[in-house]
Image: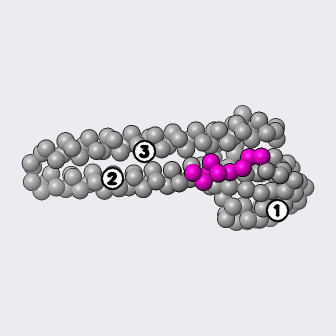
Amino acid sequence: MMTPSFKQKIYQSFLQNLNEKIDAFQHSLDELRESVLNETKSTAGDKHETALAMLQMEQSRIAKHMQDAISARKSFMQIDLLQDNDVVNTGSLIKTNHGYFLLGVALPKIVVDGQTILAISNISPLGKMLHGKKVADEIEINQNKHCIEGIC
């Protein structure tokens, strides 16, 4: 299961999820812009001003989430999938007795070919502990022992 093609499939799945999330945020922003335009045509006084302010706050919130997703995608796309596989490094797919981890950028978990994959950041506690480790090395975090079974 720890093959370059499996790793590529995982990478593409994470990238697709990020792109879908960005598209959904863009769609929401487009709908909110339309609502703001319709609201500006209204002349209902205080009620109008409150509704407009609420729409603008929602636009700001969604725009922030969209920028975060774009930033995550940019960082994710910089991951080198072809680096040395002898030791855990940024871009490594790691199989432990607790599952699969992709080291580089923290993203929501995905399922590929029936396997749950967690994308973890280099600066996360687990990411820091895994970095530089080899197959058969063990680490312990939060009273959970992780034994590295494979690196791709």
Quick check: can you spot residue 147?
no
Q: Secondary structure at mark 2?
A: helix
| Amino acid beneath label 3 | Phe
Q: Position of residue 105 (x, y in %)?
A: 64, 55
Q: Does 10 lie within the magenta span?
A: no
Circle 3 crowding by C-alpha within 10 Å: few under 14, some 14–19, many from 20: many
* Residue pointed to by mark 3: 25
Query: Residue 140 got which mark?
Result: none
> Distance of mark 2 from mark 3, alpha carbons?
11 Å
Q: Which residue is mark 1?
A: 132
Provide the residue span drawn in magenta.
Answer: 74-82
Q: Is residue 44 visible?
A: yes
SS at circle 1: loop
Q: Position of residue 121 (x, y in %)?
A: 66, 59
**Residue position marked by numbered label 2 in the rendering:** 58
Crowding at dot 1, Cα within 10 Å, few <14 / some 14-19 / many 20+, comes out as few
Q: Amino acid at mark 2?
A: Glu
The residue drawn where x is 70% and y is 36% is 9
Mark in the foreground, 1 or 2? 1
Left or right of 7: which side holds 149? right
Q: Is residue 98 left or right of residue 108?
A: right
Q: Residue at x 51, y 39 (%)?
A: 20
Question: Element type at marker 3?
Answer: helix
Q: Amino acid at mark 1?
A: Gly
- On the image, the x and y values in percent for residue 62 come to 39, 51
- Give the number of callouts: 3
> Which one is nearer the viewer's eye here, 61 or 98?
61
Q: Residue 124, image x and y in percent? A: 67, 63
- Mark 3–mark 1 CB contact (< 8 Å): no
